Image (tube, grey):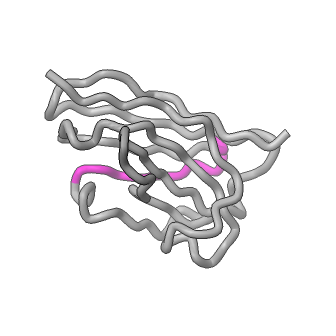
Amino acid sequence: QVQLVESGGGLVQPGGSLRLSCAASGFTLDYYAIGWFRQAPGKEREGVSCINSSGGSTYYADSVKGRFTISKDNAKNTVYLQMNSLKPEDTAVYYCAATKSSLWMLWRGYDYWGQGTQVTVSS
């Protein structure tokens, strides 16, 4: 069974950090690019960061550039999103998704999705 499971969300104060994990089962991430997306209440889902199959190429939305870092451990079949200097506007449900599409940097073609993990940034 193909599955992506996110973890690591929670409540953090502004300026704090969290590390999200996206663990894959039922398939290997060696051949997939992974994207992190988020959706805040009343807003459309947006792409946050993505990484190619080898882990050698990454992309970040302007809103998180310099604060978030995506990484991929193919041996552990897991992708991470390190989030630093968190702001209240980062509050959302964060999802990871997998794709073999060449359009991964355009946030398109993602086939497999996790269930999401809540991140709340508040004092």
Number of marks in the image? 0
Residue at left 80%, top 43%?
A: 2
Q: Left of 28 or right of it: where is 12?
A: left
Residue 7, position in %: x, y?
A: 52, 29
Relative to 122, does residue 27 appear above or below in the rendering? below
- Is 114 inside the magenta-drawn segment? no
**Closer to us: 43 or 95:** 43
Q: Is residue 6 above or below residue 108?
A: above
Instruction: Tell me the quadrant of the picture where the N terminus can be found.
Output: top right
The quadrant in which the C terminus is found is top left
Q: Is residue 40 left or right of residue 21?
A: left
Q: Is residue 99 above or below residue 1?
A: below
Magenta segment: does it hold 74? yes
Q: In this view, does 123 lie above or below 110?
A: above
| Residue at image coords 42%, 45% | 39
Residue drawn at (45%, 53%) of the image: 45
The part of the chain drawn in magenta is: 67-77
Question: Where does the image place residue 114, in percent across and percent down from the top left?
Answer: 62, 40
